[in-house]
Amino acid sequence: LNYTEPYRPQYHFSPAKNWMNDPNGLLYHNSTYHLFFQYNPAGIEWGNMSWGHATSRDLTHWDERPVALLARGYPENVTKMYFTGSAVADVNNTSGFGVEGKIPLVAMYTSSYPISQELPSGKYVRAEQQSQSIAYSLDEGETWTRYDAENPVIHNPPSPYAAEFENFRDPFVFWHGDTQKWISVTVLASLHKILIWSSDNLKEWSLASEFGPYNAVGGVWECPNMFELPIKGDPSAKKWVIVLGLNPGGPPGTVGSGTQYFIGDFKGTTFKPDSASIHPGNNSANWMDWGPDFYAATSYNGLPDGDVVQIAWMNNWQYGEVIPTSAWRSAMSVPCQLSLKKVEKEVILLQQPQQNWRRVVNLVNHQTFKHSWKSVPKGSTRLEPPGRAFNIDLSFSDHDYDDSLASTFAIAVRTSSDLKQEALIGYNFTSKEVFMDRRNSRDVSFDKTFASLYHGSLPSRADKPINLQIFVDWSSVEVLGGEGEVSLTAQIFPEGNSTEARLVSIDRVT
Ligand code: FRU
């Protein structure tokens, strides 16, 4: 693996070569984390959609494995592509796919058919149809057998939505312990609806309910993800969460794709959103991330109850196919541990880097610096150059709210020695927002919306410092604010020798 190309992520997963989009089939099984992903085996743009595969023991170091599910007919005559989906370990062998006591891993994905055809099961599909299919693996996800006898297992959208057969996709499947059933959620992308299905054996599915439209409804809804979490400080209280992609129609100030979530209750049939989680419109929706490059987030199956770890595609459909990297395109976000917290009447989602990340970043960086300042003068304070891949924990407070003091405190990273190029991450004490400014981050030329400033709100109190955790890699910046109630993820394409950093204390960023 050549990890020295310009912009090549040093500690985020990226495929050795070719195009990648959504994380798929995140599954922890036999002490191994599996990461499958939307993959084009033939180039650095979207196409020939197949499932790539990587494995890890610690969620930080990855081994890329052979392509797991290769588009049927590839390369000459692709007749079926493997779109986004999920995977489970069928420990009770409900599917009957297990032989000789081996636990089958079962993947549920969208079959996307470019042309009309009769399938091996005898079922007929139309051109551009999307249906849900399954495949299983008896060798730890290395090779897969399609369930050709019956695929697709969910052939058509339910009858009121029959016309939506081209926009019916992205099954996320999980085991629902209370009802002892498999549950799968799919989208009717253009109608901004989620369909909830249930099954005893992963093969036969019945429609349980539908959800939506709610909150942000720009573009299409894609890639639903669903899980249960305890509420911090009140472990007996649990809530269900739906996470959902929108494309286009992300958070205010972004262009392209984004990710929102809903908190509610689910007893095996319907997802009832909390009224406090309903905020119609784009401006007030519950955004998982307020930056431009966080999409198709999905969570691991196979972790203990209450343990939810998510990975997102660190790119955006607005410019994903033209970012200036080769011979690969796209990386995955830092895996984050999710939790819930009650703030007044509303339950909100918190994100923290999964625990192994403390260690990995020290390994990449090889050094740690610790600095503290009693006060930072207005203007710019140069720091010891941290390099190109590192993480920073920044904790600061505004002495008082005297107007003569600076209202904005930021750190600039990937700064060039002439200070002309950099990415700024900071906090505005007046608007109480975390922001990220990549307007001067160097290569912004490939898309006219790329050079932008992003922000997400983080309430502050005069007696408490603001905490920011910042992850910088060769072509990305992720920032988590507070306890993780706000996050901003953005790609940057700086010059390789832009390795400096500085503190910036100013009145405002305009
Ligand atoms: C989201 C998405 C999914 C689809 C996949 C195809 O990024 O559009 O809805 O399954 O990508 O690659």
Image (cartoon, rainbow, N blue to C red):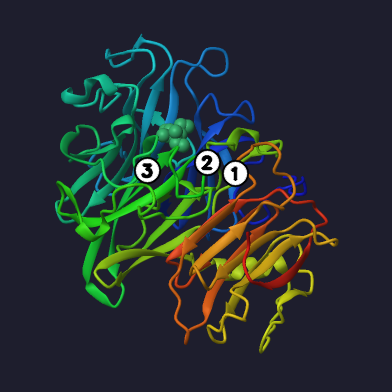
Name which residue type carries label 3. Ala
Label 1 secondary element: strand
Q: Quadrant of the C terminus?
A: bottom right
- Measured in 3D between alpha carbons, the distance from the residue under mark 2 to the one under mark 3, in whole angstroms, is 12 Å
- Measured in 3D between alpha carbons, the distance from the residue under mark 2 to the one under mark 1, in whole angstroms, is 6 Å
Name which residue type carries label 2. His
Name which residue type carries label 1. Glu
Q: Earlier in the sequence, mark 2 or mark 1?
A: 2
The residue where tag 1 is placed is: 64
The count of marks equals 3
Q: Is residue 429 left or right of residue 374?
A: left
Can residue 412 be seen here?
Answer: yes
Q: Nearer the viewer, residue 170 or 204?
A: 170
Q: Are marks 2 and 1 in contact (CB under 8 Å)?
A: yes
The residue where tag 2 is placed is: 53
Residue 447 at x, y = what percent? Answer: 64, 37
Q: Is mark 1 within 8 Å of ligand 1?
A: no
Furthest toward the front, the residue is 404
Q: Which mark is residue 87?
A: 3
Furthest toward the bottom, the residue is 374
Can residue 274 be seen here?
Answer: no
6 up-or-down from 219: above or below: below
422 up-or-down from 36: above or below: below
Q: Earlier in the sequence, mark 1 or mark 3?
A: 1
Residue 148 at x, y = what percent? Answer: 33, 22
At 27% from the left and 66% from the top, the residue drawn is: 346
At 54% from the left and 53% from the top, the residue drawn is: 333
Residue 188 at x, y = what percent? Answer: 29, 32
- Measured in 3D between alpha carbons, the distance from the residue under mark 1 to the one under mark 3, in whole angstroms, is 18 Å
